[in-house]
Amino acid sequence: SSSISAWCKSDDLPRLLSHMGAHMVLKSSRAVLAPLALTLFLGGCGAGTQAAPTASPSASVVNARDVLTTPLLSLDGTERTLGDVAGGARYVVIEFFSHHCPCQRAHDKRMIDLHEAYKGRGVAFVLVDAEASATKERDREEAESRKYPFPLLIDRGAKIAERIEAEFATYVAILDTSSGDIVYRGGIDSDHSHLTEDATPYVKNALDDLLSQKRVRKTDTKALGCVLQRS
């Protein structure tokens, strides 16, 4: 299928292997690696089963104040920044978007519910599409059909994705606009594309801790979405 072929591009094989927890020396040709990638894919988000991706890098070492002023393309063709989206909000919840990812679609309502719960409490939400195929027209259609109440912006050249080290759809980074620090990054929760009642709500927990001026209980978690097709 097109999804499988996208995952099996040679550019994505090292990231895919790392994402699924496979550790090997990449010393063979694509002909050898592609079957392994296909096997791993069948256990991943695209198949709706639970894989074991690697944890995100440590959030504590990243100051990303510069991303607040990095230009992004809005769906009306104008440029906006994360600083514009934040307004006066102390925290910006940045989710990386992929229109074709089952994990993305499965988590849409949970992100909308989070937005409704925290929008009046100094928290802004934004979706960022860093995929090479992103267009205003397609993303406008996606945003309308999914009824997103927050902006969907295009990250041309994946500059913000690279800066924050986002490699997977539904990857979330919470940015403290005061310090410029990434105070949380990883999954929305512990679910894949099949949602459960007892999932650990990572983003909710992080926001509750931040707004209560407590230490975030988990600053780094596993990103469980599909590989972002950034090139």
Image (spheres, grey):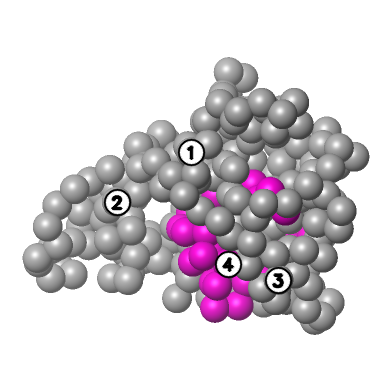
Q: Residues within 10 Å of mark 2 (few under 14, many from 20)?
A: some
Label 2 close to label 1 by CB (< 8 Å):
no
Q: Earlier in the sequence, mark 2 or mark 1?
A: 2
| Residue at the outermost top position | 198
Residue that badge 4 annotates? 160
Q: CA distance from mark 4 to mark 1?
A: 18 Å
> Residue at horizontal 35%, vertical 37%?
52
Q: CA distance from mark 2 to mark 1?
A: 16 Å
Q: CA distance from mark 3 to mark 1?
A: 24 Å
Q: Position of residue 40 (x, y in %)?
A: 29, 47
Q: Position of residue 28 (x, y in %)?
A: 9, 66
| Residue at the outermost right position | 120
Label 2 close to label 3 by CB (< 8 Å):
no
223 versus 8 height, above or below: above
Q: Which mark is residue 69?
A: 3
Q: Amino acid at mark 3?
A: Thr
> Mark 3 or mark 1, which is nearer to you?
3
Residue that badge 1 annotates? 220
Residue that badge 2 annotates? 18
Q: Is residue 84 left or right of residue 19?
A: right
Q: Position of residue 228 (x, y in %)?
A: 48, 62
